[in-house]
Image: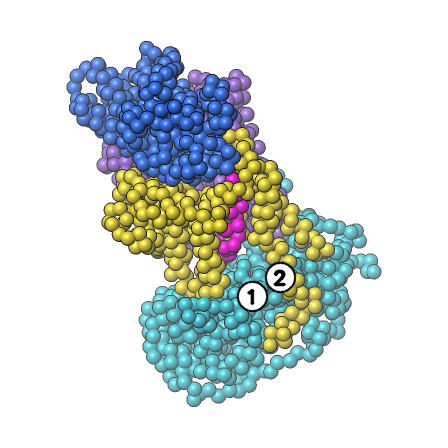
Amino acid sequence: ADDSRIALVPGGPHPYFGAWAQAGEDAARDFGLAGADYRVPQKWELSQQNQLLESLLSQGYNAFLIFPGDPVGSVSTAEELSGFGAPVMAGGGCFKDPSPAALCLGTDTGASAYEGTRKLIEAMKAKGDGPKRIAHFTGFLSDPNTQLRIDAVNRAAEEEGVEVVQTIADIDAPEAAEEKINAYLAAHSGDIDGIVTTAWVPAVAAAEALRQMGGDRIDMVGIDHDEAVLKAIKDGIVDGTMIQNPYGQAYIGAYVLDRLRSGCTIKADAPFKSNALTDRFVDSGTAYVDASNADSYIETMRGETKAIMDGFEATYLDCQ
Amino acid sequence: MPSLTRFVRTDWFGPLLACIVAIAIIQSVSPTFLSLANIQVLLLALAVNALIAFSQMIIIAIGQMNLSVGAIGGLAAIAFAGAMEVWGLPAPLAALFGLIIGLACGALNGLLVRISGMSAFVITLATLSIYKGVNLGITEAQAFYGVPQAVKAFGSAVIAGPVPWLVAPTALVAVWLWFMLRRQPVGRFILAVGGNEHAAELSGVSIARTVVTAHAISGLLAALAGILLVARLGVGQPSIGDDWLILSFAAPVIGGAVLSGGSVSVAATLLGVVIVAIITQALVLFSIDPYLTQVILGGLILAAVSFNRLRESRFIGRFGRA
Amino acid sequence: MTDSASSAMDTRPASRLSSRSSLRLFLLSNEFGLLVLIIVFAALFHGLANGFLSPFNLFALGRNAAVNILIGLSMMTVLATGGLNLAIGAMGVAAAMACGWLIEGAGLAWPLAVLGGLALGAGLGVTNGWMVVKTGLHSFIITLATMSIFFGAMIFLSQGESYRALPAVFSDLGRARVFTFVSPMFLIAVGTALVLSVLYRYTVQGREMLAAGARPEAAEMSGVRVERTVIACHMLSGLLAALAALLLTARNGAAIPSMAGQLGQDWLLPAFLGPVLGGTLLQGGKVSVLGTCLGAFLVTMLTSGLLLMQVGAFWVQSFLGILLLLAVMIDKGRRSYLRRRNLA
Amino acid sequence: MNGEAIFEARDIVKTFPGVKALGGVGLSLMPGSIHALLGENGAGKSTLIKVVTGVHRPTSGELRLDGRSVDFGNPRDAIAAGIGVVHQERNLIPRFSVAENIHFESFGANRFKPIDYRRLNESAAEWLRMLDLDIDPAMSVTELSTARMQLVEIAKALSQKSRVLLLDEPTASLTSGETDTLFEILRRLRDNGTSLVFVSHKLEEVEALCDRVTVLRDGQNACESQSAEGLTRKDYVRLMIGRAESGSGWRKRDTRAAPQVLGLDDVASGLGHSGVGLSVRAGEIVGLYGLVGAGRTELARVILGQEPVTQGTVRIDGEAVRVADVSEAIHRYRLGYVSEDRKGEGLILQHSVLANAGVPIWRKLAGRFGFLSDATVRAAVLPYLTRLEVKTPSLDQTTANLSGGNQQKISVAKWLAAGVRLLIVDEPTVGIDIKTKAYLHDLLRELADGGTAILLISSDMPEIVALADRIVVMDAFRTKGSIENDGDYTTMSEKIMTRIQDRTPSGTSSGIGETARCA
Ligand SMILES: Nc1ncnc2c1ncn2[C@@H]1O[C@H](COP(=O)(O)OP(=O)(O)OP(=O)(O)O)[C@@H](O)[C@H]1O
Ligand SMILES: Nc1ncnc2c1ncn2[C@@H]1O[C@H](COP(=O)(O)OP(=O)(O)OP(=O)(O)O)[C@@H](O)[C@H]1O
Ligand SMILES: [Mg+2]
Ligand SMILES: [Mg+2]
């Protein structure tokens, strides 16, 4: 409704959330909102996000879509916001239960990592039999999602009898990712058959590293839609990537928050999924993109968004 | 043994010894360490990190700190990539543009420090925010991808054997810095101001000019590091530079630079960078449990500097002071 | 006696204006300058942005400032020795996580667990101090290494998991409001600052810390145990970092590994900002507790005001930097104006 | 008013926050003359020199060079105008070589032209040779002793071949031999037409060297640019302090019955001492004389527990002790040490006068839990600061802003306040004006009369002879026996020099002998 001022707040400046701004504008137009504004914390710091959220509340925003800076650490701010009567919802990543968030619309990080690893193993096996070994590059260990990803990759590998020879974490900065991945490949490229990456920057760095190494002995599945990764897929250097749906998260998120403000409630028996963090999880959609659909992945995600949108009110909401 | 004594007493001897010992240990455990491919990776890391360290070193030389090296590097990086993608500038012009931005940012730091009379720490903290904010304001956290193939090729091509082209600018800079700090009045003025600002002023050195010069050089080097990093990564990422601060101080300090100013060494700083790079590589090579990586990293840094320290007291004690 | 003595002290009538000159000194001081800036900017924000003086915003401001003040004080205690402490964040998080574990893992009562956390912070500080003193290396490099070690050990032991099942006192402390707009966290920070002021002004230990920081050789020759004193400074730093982290735990309602960012580095800038703006010398030997508090408060307030004014999302940092520069320049102007007027 | 003056300062006023350092002083310099600038500590001599050389801008007043008004914005302008200076405080650039420090000004011309170090060293070596300084010009100045740093600065000033050369207490840390060499050079410069300004608290030097004189008192001219002809020491003193020299001379004091406070017996140390024997009784002043580098300061460090004793015994109150560190020496054994290195270890220059004067007694004054207020400290130290006539606008003044002599007074006063049983005083009157020097001497005597044992290290032989009851001679890290002082300078100096020249290895035996004599 036209008194809904919705804030879309990511964890910090990051290319992943680029689509949120557009999605917010589209949603404001499509649903007649007073605003659905993309407001970015100046740094990727929990305290900066908290301070921004407090400030947004003072500025009169009355509904919040939040990518939690920390699944646990952000809960208390969310409680404060909802204490002022503003509905809160998690987007992209989830709060850890219990939390005041109505629901979490995001990527199931574990599932995505699992799926990506399966795809990688498929690609490796297609090249021939024999024992296969993979390396896993991921982000900060202080982010609980990182552990979920590590577990998921290990689980997928174990199921297929593939060995994860090394996990390199804490490489969310471009310089560190570049240095460590190159160092690893220089010494151990002969020891692995595949690479799975479960964070944005390592995916870019690994793709570039493989491009420079040449040859296509090593398979790789990345994550997200960085242009460098997509180009590497088209050039046949990387097998594929696990695309997430940030646009859909913000667009649907704004819609749901507005509905919640107009008196809708979450259905008691809504068919939420569960993940490691929450029992009120709605998958915003992931898709495996490879050379065949690298150009049309946006259509794929649009479709996904539309599909979630269409049945959403009926499935999850109770509106008198 | 006068020549040995002199050798032992040079500022780069300790870091060099630490390097050699570290390399020997790692090589004995993991023979692939000194493979050509690995050396090339090491040199690539050095090419950029050394510039970052030099950029801070020149400010440490005047007894100040520059917190904005990363922000300047990041801004120059996206300016370089952006100029090529958005304006379609040819790479050399775009690089020049990035360097000029770095130089200007650095000079602005220096001017502000002089005008305000505040410590460089505060000023560069403020400009760090400004430069980073401009970076984010322009890019909105999205990378520039329009880096031409030629630039990327420069980032990975080798001159000969394992020596990448990327180290060429760094090597030139190192030689130039060494020459300037040892032989040219400008460099001596910089060190003099760091050693004893008052005495330098009494001897007719213009403090203002020297401080601005040092900051401008610092900005220039940071910008060069950012530009090389774009060539290396193949994308102009806005987050370039966010992580430089600690490294920029660590390498000169491991190399024995005195934070209060007046005593820095190009060679020792370079070796400091090498030590950090070796440690980083060793951690990757040895397949350490990711949860333990940080602990071991800290331990190794401590070991490296303590070793250096031990050497100082032992050898100098034995060979006398003369 | 004071009278006759002081006349012997200075033979020049021109310099016998002690009361006027101490007022002048105060007007020239950093602390007064910061106070002026805080008032000026508060008025500005009140005029330009809605809700700056609303009870909730003031409450949130106090709460954020509380943590920044403690972080700043934690750094200040080490700056006093002429060193610095990069491991503040890592020590703080380690202490908070230890407190969380003591409650959830070991089942201790919360007051004991809090004491345990503080003790760990102090202990880590002692470790830093001891290494600095024994190796003779600069504290920069020691704390750079221990930052990595402390944080790494914390991550290894916790495997990145948070402690969330904390007693209600924690979240109550984070949410409670005194007089509708004051956070008790802010009061704790102010109380701590008062204790520190007393320490530096009215105790031998505090004075010796400053003496040892300003000129260790001279302090040593005057009977100060410099090594012990330096270790004590680092211990104090650890203790304050732990306290800051515990307040942050209260604010977040949980002890989480990421509360100070990767390696605790998110705390570094606020840690330096408060003390340096407040007039603490990086060379050591001079601290200003009040200045540190005001400096930390000013920066928190600038951030808050800018956010409220809704400057373009990605440009906030730039404006913050510009405001900071502006503040510094205004202060410089004020000082040279006063100096000119007083000396002419 | 005086046509031939090469340089003139007129009505110079200089104020610092809270202090009027100069209240309208004048100075006019003639070519080919050596001009003495005299005054008590804090009279404004150094400030005037800094104004003349562009370090400080005068608050008001005029500087005239060759009859034309000039305005030096910074030291560079003064250097360019041919005005050279050796400041009172050392101003060398650490870690730079001697040669580079000497020729630093000459780099300015082209900032990018590579420096020719060989030429630099050669030319520096010449200036060093002229000063009889046997050091390698390529060596770093950080490795030099204070005296040599002083000489390097003088060489630096000489090398500029200035028309006007100002020397602010250049002889404070020089030996008499070095001083003589310097004077020869200064006279030669004068004869070649240079105009020199010479500041010193040693009036003998002034009498020997200077032909014109300006005296400052409390920032005013007590006399301006007069000819020195016919002026005697007495006149100078009267001009400086407004009355005649006072202070008592040597008097015989008998302390043979008093108990021993400090006894060293055949002590050797890690610093190279061997066979050091020494004894100081309560109420006794023992002078420790030696040439620079004899190891006296180092011996003080050993006594204070900063350096280990490797052999022999140290007795305090007759009991053999092992002092663990300086803190223990001060707080447990109540020893005190006035350092010769005032800036390095005597004072905390950036702290206030009050903070400096109180450090050693904080612990003693503290109440429960270590609480301590400024008022308490003030009450304890003020009598001593007053007694030494420390000139400061307030006790809160930063020590660095005081004149050199006043700083020295504070570093002595803090030990007076500490009420120690044994006070080691290392070169206490370097840079102190004659009035204060007399006061300080009286004070040390008084302190001794009150029962404090005093070990006086001094390279100033008249001072030792005027104060000490007994004189122990030290050379090359060994003691060479002690001499009863009879207060007669001529005979005593002869005896002392004979001891020093006596190169027979008398180490251990003389040490024991010395102790035995005292017992
Ligand atoms: N930078 C400063 N700030 C404040 N006061 C100062 C400063 N420099 C000098 N003064 C004051 O000016 C007065 C004159 O000091 P100056 O150093 O000129 O004395 P001086 O005659 O050289 O004494 P001395 O013989 O001890 O060297 C002193 O009272 C001193 O405290
Ligand atoms: N070659 C040298 N290089 C550096 N410093 C030296 C050298 N020779 C002597 N010194 C220093 O000069 C000082 C003089 O030595 P010492 O203090 O033992 O003698 P002293 O009898 O106390 O002489 P002084 O009259 O200088 O007090 C010492 O501090 C010593 O460290
Ligand atoms: Mg003087
Ligand atoms: Mg001595």
Residue D428 image offset from top left, x and y in percent: 53, 71
Q: Is residue A81 above or below residue B91?
A: below
Comparing D299 with D16, the one in front is: D16
Q: Residue at x 51, y 80 (%)?
A: D447
Q: Amino acid at mark 1?
A: Val
Residue placed furthest toward the front: A320
> What secondary structure is found at the residue carrying circle 1?
helix
Q: Main secondary structure of the magenta part?
A: helix
Which colour denotes chain A? blue
Which colour denotes chain D? cyan
2 or 1: mark nearer the eye: 2
Would residue C157 be visible to someone looking at this image? Answer: yes
Residue on which disc 2 sits = C22
Left or right: residue C337 versus residue B144 is: right
Which colour denotes chain C? yellow
**Which residues, given as a range, are shown in magenta?**
C282-304
Which chain is depicted purple?
Answer: B
Q: Are marks 2 and 1 on the same chain?
A: no
